[in-house]
Amino acid sequence: MPELPEVETVRRSLLPVRGRQIIAVEVREPRLRRPLPSSFARRLEGQTITEIERRGKYLLFHLSGGSCWLAHLGMSGALVLQPPDSELTAHDHVRLLFADRWLLTYNDPRRFGLMGVGRADSFAEIARLGPDPLGETFSPEDLASRARHRKRPVKNLLMDQESLGGIGNIYANEILFHAGIRPGRQSRRLTRADIERLHAAIRSVLGNAIELGGSSISDYRDGSGRPGYFQLRLCVYDRGGDPCRRCRTPVRRTVHAGRSSFYCPRCQR
Ligand SMILES: [Zn+2]
């Protein structure tokens, strides 16, 4: 599932659509996570994309008329900019045609993606999002205040989109490895030093992943069809039983809140 680094990579790869006018929208399959409203195409047609913003795992395409096109890639969604006359492929559900005949195509085999058109502050899922972990205002104090009263495991805190926007299972596991903290530790038991290390690990793991174009697990591609390479750097995620890259102790796999957790019993406390 695309997480913050993959969505940010997609955003950057799609920046060339800024300034392009949408002249037609073809909805081939409206049944995404929520069905696309019948007004979807009409509200995009004629608009020019002015900016692309990311909030957590959501993309907001700002439109010349003042509204936004919201897109979430779900489990397997991809937005790809294509040259004129590109052929349709299986699972191409939505296609935007620009005035210069280039196409922006949404492909999603599993159809868990989400789309809408409206004012940025009108989307409930955006209003509920916690701070962006790479935003300037997100500080160790901020993280400490979110952790302080929570009995739940620190990994759940990282993955709660209302606490922090954009981190999913892959990066939560990696961040905790780099912070030296076990996924099952209670959030409120974290010390000041733990919080400092955790905050630094959030920034460095997500930042490094963006530099490598995200992680291509299953079939993630950016907006120009390129895979990411961070999966080659994963230290614990999906490495249960394999030796820890730091100390060679076998990586342990457990389950928290229905999701697999991976950690090194020696490097993480
Ligand atoms: Zn280790």
Image (cartoon, rainbow, N blue to C red):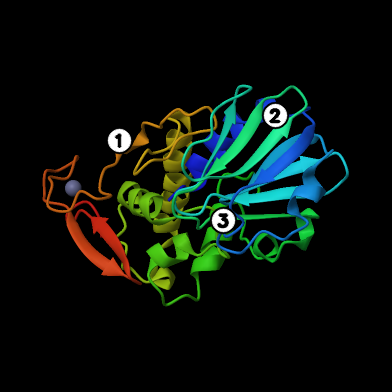
Within 10 angstroms of label 3, few (less than 14), some, or many (20 or more) residues?
many
Number of numbered tags placed on the structure image: 3
Foreground: disc 1 or disc 2: 2
Identify the element where label 1 is drawn.
Answer: helix
Which of these two is toward me, 66 or 110? 110
Q: Please report whichever mark, 3 or 1, sits nearer to the chain's N-terminal start.
A: 3
Depth check, front residue: 217 or 42: 42
Q: Earlier in the sequence, mark 1 or mark 2?
A: 2
Q: Position of residue 252 (x, y in %)?
A: 17, 58
> Dot 1, crowdedness within 10 Å: few (<14), some or many (≥20)?
some
Question: The residue tagged with tag 2: helix, strand or loop?
Answer: helix
In space, the residues marked 3 and 1 are separated at their CA atoms by 23 Å
Amino acid type at mark 2: Val
Residue highlighted by disc 1: 233
Residue drawn at x 49%, y 67% is 147
In contact (CB < 8 Å): disc 3 and disc 2: no
The residue under label 2 is 17
The structure residue drawn at horizontal position 42% and vertical position 52%, both measured from the top left corner, is 198
Residue 228 picture location, percent across and down: 40, 32
Residue corresponding to mark 3: 165
Q: What is the spatial separation of the Cα atoms under label 3 and label 2, in whole angstroms?
A: 25 Å
Q: CA distance from mark 1 to mark 2?
A: 31 Å
Residue in view at x 74 percent, y 22 percent: 100
Left or right of 99 in this view: 258: left
Q: Quadrant of the C terminus?
A: bottom left
Q: Is residue 139 above or below residue 106?
A: below
Amino acid type assigned to the residue bearing label 3 in the image = Gly
In the foreground, 169 or 187: 169
Asked if marks 3 and 1 touch (Cβ < 8 Å), the reply is no
